[in-house]
Amino acid sequence: MRLRKMIGIGIATAYLLFLTGVYFYIPFGDPGYEYGGLRLIVYTLPWGFFGQFVRIVGAVAPYHIGDLVSFFVFVVLCGGANAYIVMRMFSYRLGKRGMMVIAGVGLIIAVVAQVTAGPRERAARDYHWPPNVPKSAFLVPHWSGGWYQDCQFDPDTKKNYCRIWNFGGMTLYDEEFVPYDAGPPVPPEQLRIVDRNSGPDRVTLASGRILIPKSREADLRKFLDRR
């Protein structure tokens, strides 16, 4: 009986350690699969499905409690519920004291996850950054990973030239871009890219102006006019 209980504890502990590893690995994984923590939702079913709704609380203030809430909900609560079921299957009953200890340790790790969220995000961004894309480029985030964009103003031709790469580093555009509003070219001091409304075929600036590739000027104008 004692061996049976030890096996149950071992499996439950390995499961929780596995979830912890998955959580910290997510930013470095394939964006299409990892986006939204899909792995954690799957690995903590059935509770992970409901945990997705609870995690919305962290989305209210992601820079302050986002990672803390996500880790505690998915790993500690959802993962802990599954771990408890495993231990019960092996005839081990976890008392209130044990639950409090696990919750306390989980909360500490959740705080660590929140405190290190910024450095981990930067490390993951550098990890994914293609070697052929300059560090001066702006990453437009997307569930598929995003697009890298870089725009310049040529003082000789008085024109804007932009380059856009996909998340893997493949060049999508490397040509002259023109303002969607048909106004004058954007001077260098105003070429500050933002992710709002930017995409694989257009660049949105902080001023609200949009740059589109000259080679597709006609069809992109029609597309943006309908929005």
Image (spheres, rainbow, N blue to C red):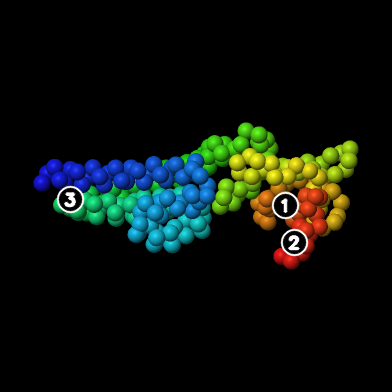
- 10 Å crowding of disc 3: few (<14), some (14-19), many (20+): some
Q: Determine whether label 1 and label 3 are within 8 Å by CB.
A: no
Q: Residue 22 appears at what percent x and percent y?
A: 40, 44
Q: Residue 205 appears at what percent x and percent y?
A: 73, 51
Who's the residue at 46% across and 45% down the image?
26
| CA distance for labels 1 and 3 | 57 Å
For badge 2, the amino acid type reads Leu
Residue 224, disc: 2
Who's the residue at 19% across and 54% down the image?
88
Q: Quadrant of the C terminus?
A: bottom right
| CA distance for labels 2 and 3 | 61 Å
Q: Residue 160 appears at what percent x and percent y?
A: 81, 44
Which mark is first along the chain, 3 or 2? Answer: 3
Which mark is first along the chain, 1 or 2? Answer: 1
Q: Residue 46 appears at what percent x and percent y?
A: 34, 59
The quadrant where residue 149 appears: top right
Q: Determine whether label 2 and label 1 are within 8 Å by CB.
A: yes
- 10 Å crowding of disc 2: few (<14), some (14-19), many (20+): few
The quadrant where residue 24 appears: top left
Mark 1 highlights which residue?
202
Q: Determine whether label 2 and label 3 are within 8 Å by CB.
A: no
| Residue 50 sits above or below residue 2 on the image | below
Q: Please tell me whether mark 2 sits on a helix, a strand or a loop.
A: helix
Who's the residue at 26% across and 47% down the image?
12
Who's the residue at 22% across and 45% down the image?
9
Question: Is residue 158 left or right of 106 when viewed as pictured?
Answer: right
Residue 28 seen from this side: yes
Question: Is residue 32 left or right of 42 when viewed as pictured?
Answer: right
For badge 1, the amino acid type reads Arg
Residue 206 seen from this side: no
| CA distance for labels 2 and 1 | 10 Å
Residue 90, disc: 3
